[in-house]
Structures are given as structure tokens and as C-alpha cells.
Image (tube, rainbow, N blue to C red):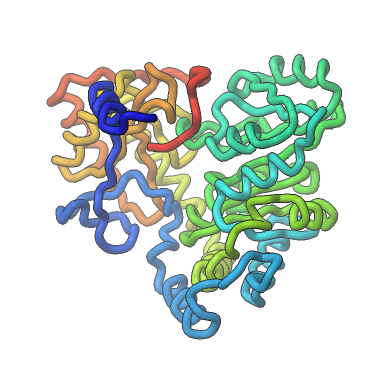
Amino acid sequence: MIDLEAELAELRRRGLHRSTRLVSGPQGPQVLVDGRPVLLLCSNNYLGFAEHPRVREAAADAALRWGVGAGASRLVSGTMTIHDRLERRLAEFIGSEACVLFGAGYLANVGVVSALAPGGSTVFSDALNHASIIDGCRLAGAQTFIYEHCDLDHLAWGLRRAKGGLVVTDAVFSMDGDVAPLAAIVELAGRHGARVVVDEAHAIGALGPGGRGAVAEAGLEGSVDAVIGTLGKALGSYGAFVCASSVLVEYLVNRARTLIFSTAPSPPAIAGALAALELLSEQPRRVEKLQANAAAMRAELLGAGVPVGGGRTQILPLIVGAADTAVALSGAALERGAFVQAIRPPSVAEDRSRLRLTVMASHTASDLRRGADAIAAAAHQIGVSFRGDAPSAPTTAMIGHAA
């Protein structure tokens, strides 16, 4: 039997204990954390849609029209007209034949990977893929080949030996913010007869024409077997979707256990996402503003003497190394009015703890400057040295990306 108190004490000793912080109000640039007003720099509400009046109104109207809950799984009585409307709109947005909604991004990734990787096949998974992909690989009947992060030579080596299978990758990696080399991955997979699944959770609304993601940015529409996206980040709501061919979607409806055995997403969440998707189509410059804010924040951090890892996306890793150092830096930044969470093992490798800073299109230039100054001052106070090096693969004990 697990000694719960001892386990918690060990987590505290290693700087890995976690607890929630109470956020009051909507997920805008400014929030109340534990009763104090602070600048929010760790939310995935990338386009500011979670607090947008039209999104709020759509969710409220849906609750009055369809009720709060769907009442059952998709295959019982849980598929409602609002679900069908969003699925059709998402398929049009992504440029696929069909779409199916899941209750959450975690459920979508676990369901898709486990359904498409039967016994006797191989899943090829990037070493820094999200926990939901990792767990999907664990539940699949297939063997899993973990290739070094974005290492095309390693992936090619594995594909040559397996002769087919399923390649699955994040589009934008959630802890480091770098973008997968999708064009090369698709070419390699095609050469070796493998399917490709791309998780666009942090790319939808952030990359590509009209915010359609990294697959669209790379000009690969129609070349990827399944695009998985979330409604809970740039689209400001909750839930997830898979866009694919009609045949593949029909297969998932019949084989994806996380869809079959989960209650359907709530009507207010679906209506809110539908409103956000319409806003994105009407206001594509929000994507440009997000990208501009990401570049501006990098410049502000560098100007304040804080080296930042990652590439060009809205996710900016500030790597410090030790878990307790990351926790101390997060606390010191919060005292200066900037809320940025510490990310520690098992979310990242043992020596790669960090602050994971995210910007939103709704941040102002003064917000970004104030945030960078707060982080720099906090680092100076506790004597932190940052590491601006590239991402590295996790240890074998890595189980995914939680804070």
C-alpha cells in the first residue's frame, strides 16, 4: 500500500510538490491570483476568446436552448445539433472531409493513437510529445518507437525497419514552443507507407493562414491522415476535435474508446467554440497580433537580460535547470505581479525545469514590458542563471507535460 504522506513529503523535498492557485475572473491579461491582481503570463487563451463577449453570449444562449450537459455519450443520445454544426464548420476550416468532436484534447489523442495502432504495428512518437500521446501509445496494442526530438534521421531509421505504422507528433511542442518539421515527416512517412497524425493543440489559432495551424502553414492540407485540435486553447472553450477523411472518422466513431465511453461535450462549450471559430474567420489579424506579441516578448526578455529558448511561437521557455529554482523564481515573479508557472519533472527532464511563459493576442506592449521586467528582477533577486539552449529529450521516467 502506498504511504501517501511519505510520498507527498518526498515530493516536497525534491521541489516537485504541486498545488493549485485560485484565479478569479476570466482569463484575460490581468487576473486575480489568490486575491491579488497580477499579469497573466501562463494561460493558453492565446487569442483572448475565452473572455470575449460574443463567446460568452453564445455559451449562455446555448445553455438556455440545449441545457448545460449533453446527458450521454456520443453514441447514445449525446450527439446534438450543435455538435453537428461545429463538426461541419471545423471540417471546412481545416479542409478535411469530416470531423468528430471529443470531450477533451487528452481524450482525442489517447483515442486516436490507441485506435489506429493495433497489435503488430508500430507507433513512431517524438520524444517530446504530449502526455496524452504518450498514454495513447501505452494503451495501443502496437510497439512504440520513440525517436529523438525532431530527429528525422532517427525517424527514418525506425521507419525503414518497421515497414509502416503510425507517425504521431505535436505540431507545436507544448513545453518548448518549437515547431515540428512536418513537411519532412510527411515525406518520410509516405515513403515508408506510414500514416501521420498531427496534434495541432498549440498551433490552431497561432500559425498558418487564418490560424489554421502548422499543417496548413506547411502546405500539407490533405497530406496528413488526421489533424487533432483543441477547443480549449486559442478557441477559448473546452473540448477537442479530429479532422480526417470520412472513412477514418467513421472508424474512430466505432473504435475510439475515449469517444465511445465518455459523455459528449457540453452544449455551452461547443457553442462558445463555434462563436470563437467565427470570430477567428472574421478577425484573422488576431493571429498576426499573437505572433507579433511573441516576437515582442522575446525582445523584451532579451533586453532585460533573460535568454529565452524555443523558436517563434507564443510559448517561451525560460530554462533554469533545478526544480526548486524554478519554483522560487515563479514565486518571486508573482510577488512582482507576474504569474508564470514553474514546470518541473516529470513534465520536463530532470535538469530542464523552467518557467513556461505564454503570451496572448490581448496583451499590450506595456504588459509585455512589465512582465519581462518582473521576471528579470525576480531572477536577479534570487540569483538565477538561465539556460537558452535547445530542447532535449526527456528521461525514460518522463510521463508527460503537466505543470
Q: Is residue 345 visible?
A: yes
Side of 263 relative to 345 (left or right): right
Please name the residue shown 53% across and 69% down the image.
Answer: 266
* Residue at the front extreme, as displayed: 1
Is 359 rendered above or below residue 376? below
- In the figure, is residue 31 to the left or right of 121? left
Return the x and y of residue 267 as percentages of the image width and height. 54, 72
Q: Is residue 366 visible?
A: no
Residue at the image point whose x is 82% and y is 17% from the top: 160
354 relative to 159 in the view: left or right: left
Vertical relation: 171 (above or below) 242:
above
Q: Quadrant of residue 324?
A: top left
In the image, taking residue 253 as reference, residue 349 lies left or right, namely left
Q: Quadrant of residue 133?
A: top right
- The quarter of the image holding the N terminus is top left
Front-most of residues 368 and 391: 391
Q: Position of residue 138 (x, y in %)?
A: 63, 32
Q: Where's residue 57, x and y in %?
A: 44, 77
Residue at the spot x=45%, y=74% of the render? 54
* Residue displayed at 67% across by 40% down: 198
Q: Nearer the viewer, residue 384 or 350?
A: 350
